[in-house]
Image (spheres, grey):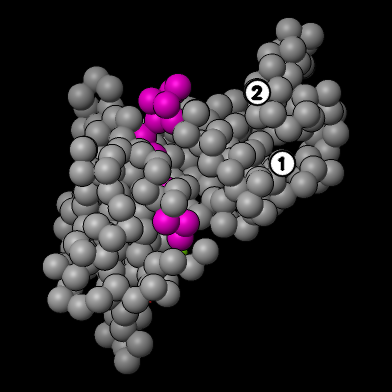
């Protein structure tokens, strides 16, 4: 589905500040994989997402996407803008995934059309009813407010809308970078539950960075741990289903020959 082959990212190369942020990352995801990603601050998690999304070019290695028809597309040098049609991404800040100064229904139109290109539309009764149903399903009670500007909604509501809109744009892969970390506990659970439901129903392929160990352990079919720009643990299948925090500590010790400090991962 997506494959990273020996990907390196080096910041400030050749200067005293040189920082080898990704050190030969190899990763293959299958369609429908839901992978949680943990690791201390600075481990390279967001850099991994930036590499996949094309935020800046990688220094070496390749990134390929395989379509449903088996066609392999090398996206290593493709622009972030172009990749965004295939790769959905949600960040921590709940205010940036939606356009606050536009009506809720117009936000939905744009995400369905995957951008502003040729944006002429009329929303008929049928389309509005369809949008109301989609929003109702979020359980926020805002389905009657299609014409309200999104800026009027709370952070939790906006992150749930961002999730809905990102899923509506039908990404081949969904990147979640601590997308519940800035929400209060109730909204964080709400958005996490919606994330699991959408992923299951639509067989989404998801990478989810989280500092919430409970979410990392309870969610998905595979868990990665990053450290120092490398994937040091990759746990899937039955082992992932039964995984405990103690197992992770044990596996970390075996891989790194030192203890995992609590503040290296248990930040929330
Ligand atoms: N745009 C950038 N320019 C220079 N250094 C960066 C940049 N982005 C990240 N880094 C550095 O790369 C390393 C990995 O960062 P990051 O991927 O953001 O870590 P994480 O998301 O796991 O906390 C850190 O040392 C960070 O300071
Ligand atoms: Mg990060």
- The image quadrant where one finds the N terminus is top left
Name the N-terminal-most of marks 1 and 2: 2
Q: Residues within 10 Å of mark 1 (few under 14, many from 20)?
A: many
Secondary element type, mark 2:
loop
Q: Specify the segment rendered in magenta.
A: 199-213
Q: Residue at x 69, y 17 (%)?
A: 133
Q: Residue at x 67, y 54 (%)?
A: 184
In the image, taking residue 236 as reference, residue 39 lies left or right, namely: right
**267 to 70, vertically: above or below:** below
Q: Nearer the viewer, residue 30 or 119?
A: 30
Give the residue pinned by disc 1.
157
Q: Quadrant of residue 122?
A: top right
Q: Residue at x 47, y 40 (%)?
A: 88
State whether label 2 is within 8 Å of ligand 2: no
Kindly tell me whether residue 107 is visible in this rendering: yes
Residue 213 placement (x, y as % from top left): 42, 56
In the image, taking residue 151 as reference, residue 55 lies left or right, namely: left
Q: Residue furthest bottom?
A: 16
Secondary element type, mark 1:
helix
Kindly tell me whether residue 131 is visible in this rendering: no
Q: Residue at x 50, y 28 (%)?
A: 198
Give the residue pinned by disc 2.
137
């Amino acid at each position: 589905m997506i494959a990273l082959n020996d990907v390196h990212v080096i910041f400030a190369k050749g200067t005293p500040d040189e920082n080898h942020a990704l050190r030969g990352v190899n990763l293959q995801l299958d369609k429908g994989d839901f992978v949680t990603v943990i690791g201390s601050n600075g481990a390279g998690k967001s850099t991994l997402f930036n590499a996949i999304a094309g935020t800046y070019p990688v220094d070496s290695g390749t990134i390929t996407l395989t379509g449903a028809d088996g066609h392999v597309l090398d996206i290593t040098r493709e622009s972030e803008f172009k990749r965004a049609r295939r790769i959905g991404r949600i960040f921590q800040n709940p205010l940036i995934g939606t356009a606050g100064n536009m009506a809720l229904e117009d936000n939905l139109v744009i995400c369905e059309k995957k951008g502003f290109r040729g944006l002429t539309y009329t929303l008929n009764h049928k389309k509005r009813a369809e949008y109301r149903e989609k929003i109702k399903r979020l359980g926020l009670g805002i389905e009657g407010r299609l014409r309200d500007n999104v800026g009027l909604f709370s952070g939790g509501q906006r992150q749930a809308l961002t999730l809905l809109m990102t899923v509506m744009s039908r990404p081949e892969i969904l990147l979640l970078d601590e997308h519940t970390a800035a929400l209060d506990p109730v909204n964080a659970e709400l958005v996490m539950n919606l994330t699991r439901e959408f992923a299951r129903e639509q067989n989404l392929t998801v990478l989810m960075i989280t500092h919430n160990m409970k979410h990392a352990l309870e969610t998905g079919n595979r868990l990665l741990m990053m450290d120092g720009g490398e994937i040091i643990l990759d746990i899937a299948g039955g082992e992932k289903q039964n995984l405990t925090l103690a197992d992770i500590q044990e596996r970390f010790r075996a891989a790194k020959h030192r203890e995992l400090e609590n503040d290296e991962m248990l930040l929330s």
